[in-house]
Image (cartoon, rainbow, N blue to C red):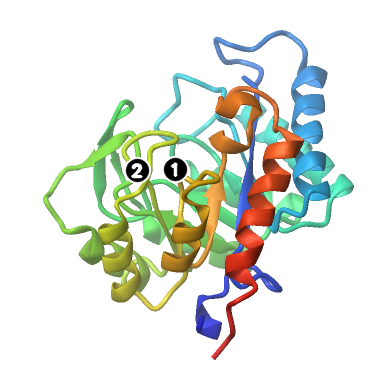
Amino acid sequence: MIAADRILVPGALRPIIGMVHLKPLPGTPGYGGSFQAVLDAALADARVLDEEGIDAMFIENYGDVPFRKSGVEPHTIAAMTMIAAEIRRVTRKPLGINVLRNDPIAAIGIAMVCGAGMIRVNVHTGAMLTDQGIIEGNANATLDYMAKLGSEIKILADVHVKHAAALAPIPIDEAAADAVERGLADAIIITGNRTGDGVDIDELRMVRRSVQAPVLVGSGADLDTIGELLQESDGVIVGSWLKEQGEVRRPVDRERVRRLMAAAAGVIDSDTIH
C-alpha cells in the first residue's frame, strides 16, 4: 500500500516521469544555429511521451555542457520558458523544470510563467564536489523566492546527486532527512553515480524509511528494473532508456515508452492508498 502523503503526481500512485532532454541552447558550445530545431525536437519528444501514457515529464537543458554552477544567462531562461510553454500547449501532463547545473531560481521563474508544477534541484541542501567545482545548496534562497512569488511549486531535491561526491561523509538517509525536514523539500530523488547508472537498492530503502515524503528513482530505470524500482520507490524518472537505442542524446523511442509503461502497469495496478 502507498500512503496518501507519498503521492507526488495527482492521479498517479507511482508516477513514471519521462525526460525531455533539450538539445544545446543558444550561447552554448554545441548549439547548432537553429532554435527552431531545438524546439521541434523537444515538442516531438513530449508528444511521444504524452501519447504513450507517461504520467508526467521534466525538461532540462541537458545539452548545455559544460554547465554553469548556477546563475544561467537570461537567454537560457528565455529559451527554456518558450520551450516549456510550447510543451504545455501540446500536452496537459504535469511538467517539471530542471535548470542545470543548479539554478532553482531560474527554474522557479520558468515554472511560474509556463504553469509547471515542480522543479528539480540537484543540490538543495549540503555541499557537493562536482565537475563544476563545489556547489552548495541554498534552500533558504529557493524557499524565499517561492514565497515572494506566492508559488506552490513542488521541490524535488536530489540527495548525493549523480556526477558528484558529498564533501562530508554524511549517510544518504541523514542527508535526505535534512533535505526534507530542514530544507523543506517536497520529494527526494536518488540516483546512481552517473547518467543511466542504477541506484543502490539498499540506499533507496534506507532513504524511503527515513523521510515522510515521496522518494523517486532518478537514474538507471529500464525494462528489466522498472518492476523492482516501483516496488521500492514512490515513482521513477526515466530518461536514457526511453531514447532510441537507449542513448540519451537520441530522440524518444515510441516503442520503448510503450513497453516500459506496459511493464510498469502491472506493478502500479496492485497498489492501494491508505
Residue kind at label 2, given as amino acid type: Gly
For label 2, the residue is 192
Count of labels in the image: 2
Q: Label 1: how many residues lie within 10 Å, few (<14), some (14-19) or many (20+)?
A: many
In front: 274, or 210? 274
The quarter holding residue 170 reads bottom left
Residue 196 placed where, x, y %? 44, 35
Q: Is residue 240 toward the left or the right of residue 126 in the image?
A: right
Quote the CA–CA distance across marks 2 and 1: 7 Å
Residue 42 placed where, x, y %? 75, 32
In front: 69, or 45? 45
The first of marks 2 and 1 along the sequence is 2
Q: Residue at x 58, y 11 (%)?
A: 30
The quarter holding residue 149 reads bottom right
Task: Give the label on residue 62, or none.
Answer: none
Residue 233 placed where, x, y %? 44, 65
Name the front one of labels 2 and 1.
1
Report whether residue 65 is seen: yes
For label 1, the residue is 220
In front: 259, or 12? 259
Q: Residue at x 45, y 25 (%)?
A: 67
Q: Please determine whether, in this image, residue 50 is positioned above or below residue 43.
A: below
Q: Quadrant of the C terminus?
A: bottom right
**Which element is circle 2 on?**
loop
Q: Is residue 48 toward the left or the right of residue 18 in the image?
A: right
